[in-house]
């Protein structure tokens, strides 16, 4: 069956938190920003004007991602949004879940009036970096980097929507 995406419902709270905790704790440690978003996504994401996308496969929640106003505003005249909390269930990775979530998040960004999207990741997450590059994101140079609330993030990427 194909991967489908939809917007977050209150019943997704546990799956949203578990999927993200799973990958973060597999490779890193939970940080304060993670805890805030995972413990209360209604306030820390939805309440700030963001959206959460849920991916389903055979009726089961298998992936997620969110788009929010960025934690840093570069004050460059663009309407920026930031992608956070991209996750796919470990046993179904490689089945297009990340791409489906990314496509839905980019569509949500457009609906929210964004003309640019920013994200952070870690170079060790090679599949994630490839997904972002396939989706049109480019890495920022060292002279373009934004401040980050995450110790684990060493790659920052942007997508200018008018360039698509």
Image: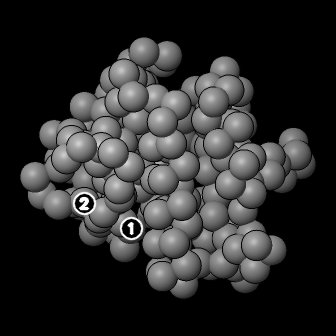
Residue at screen point 48% across, 82% down: 111
Res. 50 mark: 1
Quadrant in the rendering for residue 38:
top left
Give how far across and how far down residue 100 sits, in percent: 48, 53
**Residues at badges 2 and 1 in contact (C-beta under 8 Å)?**
no
Work out whether residue 153 or residue 95 is closer to the camera in this orientation and state it: 95
Give how far across and how far down residue 76 sits, in percent: 76, 76
Mark 2 is surrounded, within 10 Å at the Cα level, by few (under 14), some (14 to 19) or many (20 or more) other residues, namely: many
SS for dot 2: loop
Residue at screen point 37% across, 73% down: 49
Q: Quadrant of the N terminus?
A: top left
Residue at screen point 35% across, 58% down: 5
Residue 133 visible? The answer is: yes
Mark 1 is surrounded, within 10 Å at the Cα level, by few (under 14), some (14 to 19) or many (20 or more) other residues, namely: many
Work out whether residue 149 or residue 18 is closer to the camera in this orientation and state it: 18
Q: Is residue 152 above or below residue 37?
A: above
SS for dot 1: loop
Res. 8 mark: 2
Please state if 132 lies on the left or on the right of 98 as rendered: right
Give how far across and how far down residue 13 sits, in percent: 17, 47
Work out whether residue 66 or residue 62 is closer to the camera in this orientation and state it: 62
Please state if 119 lies on the left or on the right of 112 as rendered: right
């Amino acid at each position: 069956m194909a991967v489908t995406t939809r917007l977050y419902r209150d019943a997704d709270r546990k799956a949203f938190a578990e999927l993200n905790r799973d990958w973060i704790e597999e490779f890193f440690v939970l940080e304060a920003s993670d805890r805030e978003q995972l413990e209360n996504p209604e306030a820390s994401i939805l309440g700030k004007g963001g959206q959460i996308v849920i991916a389903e496969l055979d009726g089961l929640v298998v992936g997620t991602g969110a788009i929010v106003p960025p934690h840093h505003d570069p004050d460059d005249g663009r309407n920026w949004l930031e992608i956070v909390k991209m996750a796919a269930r470990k046993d179904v990775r490689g089945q297009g879940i990340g791409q489906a979530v990314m496509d839905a998040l980019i569509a949500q960004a457009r609906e929210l009036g964004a003309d640019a999207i920013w994200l952070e990741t870690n170079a060790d997450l090679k599949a994630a970096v490839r997904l972002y590059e396939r989706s049109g994101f480019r890495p920022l140079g060292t002279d373009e980097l934004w401040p980050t609330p995450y110790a684990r993030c060493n790659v920052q990427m942007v997508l200018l929507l008018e360039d698509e």
